[in-house]
Image: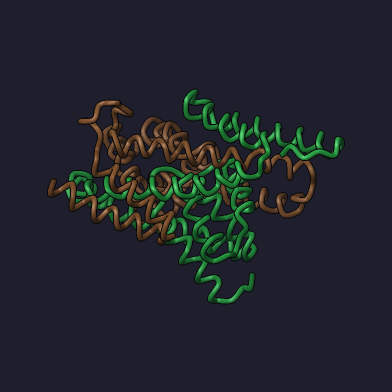
Chain colours: A brown, B green
């Protein structure tokens, strides 16, 4: 009953992963490497690398990757379903409560307190990616020679185009991928 | 929001394309969704978008999936939520299925890695653009408390690496207490 095992493992990952993708990583490792032995630690490290290189939540990426390796496309579907089912149930409940009680002073207050928090969290995530993009895995350095100027230029140009001309963000991301790719290969 | 085929298709297309570009963690999808659903389509208010982000953050599971469920639900009920889930899950499902078949070749490919490196800088530009707009609006309200919460939450999370769950709990509780107190005192701090 490999399908049931995959479903149950990823259901637990979906249920207990609070606080973003990186928080889910130890849970995934625990289920996939330690408990079930579906991947070796080296394969798991590859999976994390690939997850960071590709779009999408790390938990969904892992579910698809592990499911495909263990039981083909069916395995991928079952694992992904297990992974998102807890979210579906809990978030639907929250959405219903929000719709029902959003006019209450307490709920309005909670949300008013959380809105600036969310902006701060988005900014933190953006800053982490920015540091990674400009200086690589080692983190921020004052050293000019270790700064990636192609990335700095792409970032500045992208931000300028977004703010001044309100270009479509997808166009900015694809454009910087193509222009950056060519620059990295040629320079 | 009318439940026409056209609207369902727009919802699916939007969540699918946003999910396909959510590199680097769940928060990245919020700026993208804000641009699409608030600025471009006008289906949501900016404040609602942030409320949904806060709700999504307070639930377990992947942020991108959670916020898609909320947006889909708010726009077109349960069927909208289902359409949004499918749109959000399909891109990583397709991409990872293909990659897992020949992942060693993908991981070591030089062209793939430089294109992704370039895209990372573009993703940053999009995030900063939206943060400037949203942060600017919070500062323009001229209320001290939200501004303090914004900078405080950033410092505590980015510099001190405090678990997000505690930050969310604290700021939510603070907002609730202050708003209750304000209602009694007839003031508006938050």
- Residue lying furthest bottom: B5
Position of B106 relative to A142 (above/below): below
Is residue A86 visible to the viewer in this orientation of the structure?
no
Q: Describe residue A22's horizontal placement relative to residue B2 as left or right.
A: left
- B185 and A182: which one is in front? B185
Residue drawn 12% across the image and 49% down it: A186
Image coords of residue B187 (percent x, y): 81, 38
**Residue B184 sits in quarter:** top right
- B19 and A70: which one is in front? B19
Image coords of residue A101 (percent x, y): 77, 50
**Residue A38 sits in quarter:** top left
Q: Describe residue B64's horizontal placement relative to residue B145 as left or right.
A: left
**Residue B57 sits in quarter:** top right
Image coords of residue A119 (percent x, y): 55, 42
Position of A135 relative to A80 (above/below): above
Is residue B106 visible to the viewer in this orientation of the structure?
yes
The quadrant the C terminus of chain A occupies is top left
Residue drawn 29% across the image and 26% down it: A142
- Residue lying furthest top: B160
Residue drawn 24% across the image and 56% down it: A178
């Amino acid at each position: 009953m490999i399908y049931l095992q995959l479903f149950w493992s990823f259901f637990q990952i979906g249920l207990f992963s609070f606080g973003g993708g990186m928080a889910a990583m130890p849970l995934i490792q625990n289920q996939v490497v330690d408990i079930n032995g579906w991947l070796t630690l080296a394969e798991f490290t590859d999976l994390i690398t690939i997850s960071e290189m590709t779009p999408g939540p790390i938990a969904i990426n892992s579910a698809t990757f592990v499911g495909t390796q263990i039981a083909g496309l069916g395995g991928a579907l079952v694992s992904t379903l297990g992974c998102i089912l807890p979210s579906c149930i809990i978030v639907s409940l929250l959405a219903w409560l929000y719709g029902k009680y959003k006019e209450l002073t307490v709920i309005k207050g909670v949300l008013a307190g959380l809105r600036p928090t969310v902006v701060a969290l988005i900014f933190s995530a953006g800053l982490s990616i920015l540091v990674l993009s400009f200086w690589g895995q080692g983190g921020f350095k004052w050293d000019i020679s270790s700064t990636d100027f192609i990335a700095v230029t792409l970032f500045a140009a992208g931000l300028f185009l977004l703010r001044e001309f309100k270009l479509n963000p997808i166009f900015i991301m694809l454009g910087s991928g193509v222009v950056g790719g060519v620059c990295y290969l040629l320079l | 929001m009318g439940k026409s085929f056209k609207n369902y298709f727009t919802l699916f297309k939007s969540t699918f394309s946003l999910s396909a570009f959510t590199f680097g963690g769940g928060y990245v999808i919020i700026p993208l969704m804000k641009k699409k659903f608030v600025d471009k389509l006008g289906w949501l208010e900016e404040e609602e978008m942030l409320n949904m982000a806060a709700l999504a953050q307070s639930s377990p599971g992947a942020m991108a999936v959670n916020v898609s469920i909320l947006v889909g639900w708010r726009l077109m009920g349960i069927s909208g939520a289902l359409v949004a889930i499918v749109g959000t899950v399909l891109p990583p499902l397709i991409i990872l299925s293909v990659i897992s078949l020949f992942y060693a070749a993908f991981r070591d490919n030089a062209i793939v890695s430089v294109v992704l490196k370039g895209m990372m800088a573009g993703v940053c530009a999009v995030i900063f653009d939206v943060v400037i707009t949203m942060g600017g609006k919070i500062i323009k309200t001229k209320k001290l408390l939200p501004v303090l919460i914004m900078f405080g939450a950033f410092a505590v999370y980015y510099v001190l690496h405090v678990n997000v769950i505690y930050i969310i709990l604290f700021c939510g509780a603070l907002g609730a207490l202050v708003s209750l107190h304000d209602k009694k005192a007839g003031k508006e701090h938050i």
